[in-house]
Image (tube, grey):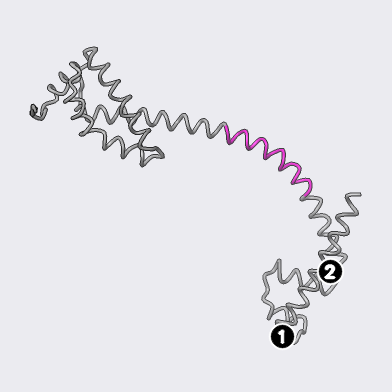
Amino acid sequence: MVVRPLVKSEEELIDGIRSGDDHVLKLLYARCYPAVLRLVTQNSGTETEAEDMFQDAMVVLHRNVGNGMELSCQVKTYLYSVSRRLWLKELSKRKHAVRAKDSEMFIELSADAQNDIGRSEKQYEVMSESLSALGEPCAELLKQFYLEDHSMTDIAESFGYTNADNAKNQKYKCLQRLKKIFFQRLNNSDE
């Protein structure tokens, strides 16, 4: 078994990349890949995607160094920068795809919302009429509880009920009457 000395200088790394030295490529992988893996996995990516980004960065490095480009930084920094740029480009593509999908969904929801708004306005109108038809003291009791956030104890006192439980029972009866009126009016308005 031949034991090779560790490559220490940047020049040795560049020469090894140019010559396709497996030892240098494995060394670069061991030194540089963990940072790329961390970058990708901490930014919505998987280990497989990190491997792909690193492979692509190695191809860019090999091509550029093979064409005589001189690095103005360490090989590790260059690989990380290229991987980062490639990953950001990938994330940007995903974001555009999500935006397009969201736009399509928004258009579909807008059409549904228009129908819902029409229904909601109609239901609001029917509810308003139903409250008026409900009469007093029920309309006032429901208004104090649901709109003004009064407690059952306050309502019992205000309406002269003996306790909060009696007020609660009355609120339930009023609510049942309101529902009955509301649904009758709603059904009649659909006809």
> For mark 2, what is the residue?
177
Q: Nearer the viewer, mark 2 or mark 1?
A: 2
- The residue under the point 30% across, 35% down is 36
- The residue under the point 31% across, 40% down is 38
- The residue under the point 31% across, 37% down is 37
- The residue under the point 17% across, 25% down is 24
Q: Is residue 166 above or below residue 86?
A: below
Labelled disc at residue 43:
none
- CA–CA distance in space, label 2 to label 1: 22 Å
Residue 77 percent across, percent down from the top left: 23, 30
Q: Secondary structure at mark 2?
A: helix
Classify residue 82 by image quadrant.
top left
Classify residue 112 by image quadrant.
top right
Residue 56 percent across, percent down from the top left: 33, 24
Name the amino acid, label 2: Arg
Who comes first in sequence, dot 2 or dot 1?
1
